[in-house]
């Protein structure tokens, strides 16, 4: 699995003794980062929008102009959803109710173990809910270069957009920026590195996304190879969290190599669309990745295989490929070298250039299958 960063906590507590006690509990925990302690409820929403904490702890008995329950209501009604744990006392019993913005309740006094357990439980449950909240992330991956991965990712994203889904494409090949090359993007076009390191808002995102003529938004990789190291796993987590709230479909094009960044993109995916072709090296690497995915703990249903250039078998039968993979590939795409190369050279998606071509129809069918579980933003309760 990709390495996990500490859970970032915002504490809303106006009793100094309680705040100091919680600070002490967190001080011994390497998996926790306390971002701030707020005593004024009126400042909580703004701070949450700025620092994007993973969990907010709120004292139900918070006093002041904006009391504890009102803070919870504000966060629940905002466009910046965040899991909330309400701290209370036995004399003021409360029940967890995510629909009301209360994802966990912890009664004082509590131990460090009680606090850490509750935070872990709430964060895990909230993440699971977010995955099924309506947005779909499709990570396009291949264990070997040259199999058409980037072209497929681009056309798949455009096809999803043509189906009426608000779609964003992430150039996850951070080192070489494959999308920059494919789309002939200017070298000074903004990239993921232009986002703030600590605070990301919707406005920041719109300033950085590249608007492609095909109608989709694209978050580009850095313009130079050495800049890839400046993108952290935390940056990726923050960006993906925001994108899932804004877009119905997120398509990620990854690099062929396995590293922490690629694993982060694979971990978050609802579906990993793995590209395979009829050549022995690709098949060998695909089988090796299947073993790696099982070791990581991915469910078999998370990975779907796409056979690219399916009509160019090269002496390998589909039945032989299916036996090697241990299952029948879910998707096939026919080859159309002339159309694909000409479209790529023009920097336009072939699904728009020639939508009636067989290769375009294949990609559109896959897009329909990929986005079928994504609900419209209005239905999902998002902007």
Image: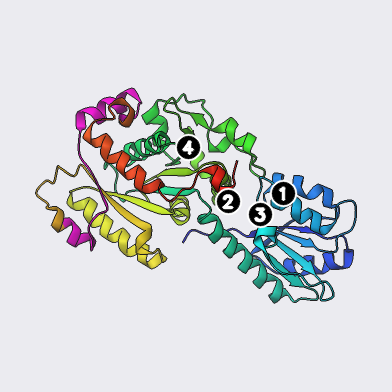
Q: Where is residue 55 drawn, in percent x and y? A: 68, 58
Please report contact status of discs 3 and 1: CB closer than 8 Å, yes or no: yes
Residue carrying label 3 = 82
Q: Where is residue 380 drawn, in percent x and y? A: 55, 48
The alpha-carbon separation of the residues under discs 3 and 2 comes to: 16 Å
Range of magenta residues: 321-350
Residue carrying label 1 = 48
Q: Give the mark, 3 or 2, whose residue is nearer the N terminus.
A: 3
The alpha-carbon separation of the residues under discs 4 and 3 comes to: 27 Å
Q: Residues within 10 Å of mark 3 (few under 14, many from 20)?
A: many
Tell whether position 337 is magenta. yes
Residue at screen point 27% across, 27% down: 354
Residue carrying label 4 = 221
The alpha-carbon separation of the residues under discs 3 and 1 comes to: 8 Å
Whether residue 6 appears in this view of the structure is yes
Q: Is residue 143 left or right of residue 131?
A: left
The alpha-carbon separation of the residues under discs 1 and 4 comes to: 27 Å
Tell whether position 96 is magenta. no
| SS state under label 3 | loop
Q: Which circle marks residue 234 in the picture? A: 2
Q: Nearer the viewer, residue 147 or 328?
A: 328
Q: Give the mark, 1 or 4, whose residue is nearer the N terminus.
A: 1
Note whether 261 is above or below 60 in the view shown: above
| SS state under label 1 | helix
């Amino acid at each position: 699995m990709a390495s996990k960063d500490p859970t970032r906590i915002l504490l809303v507590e106006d009793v100094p003794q309680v705040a100091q006690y919680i600070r002490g509990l967190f001080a011994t925990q390497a998996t926790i980062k306390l971002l701030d302690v707020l005593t004024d409820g009126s400042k909580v929403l703004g701070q949450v929008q700025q620092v994007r904490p993973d969990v907010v702890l709120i004292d139900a008995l918070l006093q002041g102009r904006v009391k504890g329950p009102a803070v919870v209501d504000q966060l629940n009604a905002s466009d910046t959803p965040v899991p909330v744990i309400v701290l209370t006392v036995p004399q003021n019993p409360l029940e967890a109710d995510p629909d009301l913005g209360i994802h966990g309740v912890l009664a004082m006094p509590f131990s460090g173990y009680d606090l850490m357990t509750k935070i872990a439980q709430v964060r895990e449950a909230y993440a699971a809910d977010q995955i099924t909240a309506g947005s779909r992330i499709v990570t396009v991956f291949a264990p070997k270069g040259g199999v058409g991965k980037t072209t497929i990712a681009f056309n798949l994203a455009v096809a999803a957009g043509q189906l009426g889904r608000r779609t964003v494409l992430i150039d996850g090949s951070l080192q070489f920026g494959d999308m920059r090359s494919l789309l002939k993007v200017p070298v000074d076009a903004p990239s993921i590195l232009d986002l703030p390191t600590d605070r990301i808002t919707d406005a920041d995102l719109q300033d950085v996304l590249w608007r492609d003529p095909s109608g989709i938004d694209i978050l580009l990789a850095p313009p130079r190879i050495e800049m890839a190291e400046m993108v952290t796993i935390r940056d990726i987590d923050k960006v993906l969290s925001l994108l899932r709230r804004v877009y119905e479909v997120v398509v990620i094009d990854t690099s062929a190599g396995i590293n922490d960044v690629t694993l982060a993109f694979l971990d978050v995916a609802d579906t990993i669309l793995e590209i395979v072709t009829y050549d022995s090296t690709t098949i060998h690497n695909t089988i090796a990745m299947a073993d790696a995915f099982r070791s990581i703990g991915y469910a078999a249903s998370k990975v779907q295989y796409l056979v690219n250039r399916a009509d160019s078998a090269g002496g390998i039968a589909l039945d032989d490929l299916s036996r090697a993979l241990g299952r029948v590939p879910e998707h096939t795409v026919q080859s159309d070298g002339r159309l694909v190369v000409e479209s790529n050279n023009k920097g336009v998606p072939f699904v728009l250039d020639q939508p009636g071509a067989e290769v375009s129809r294949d990609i559109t069918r896959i897009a329909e299958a990929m986005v079928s579980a994504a609900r419209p933003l209005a239905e999902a309760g998002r902007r």
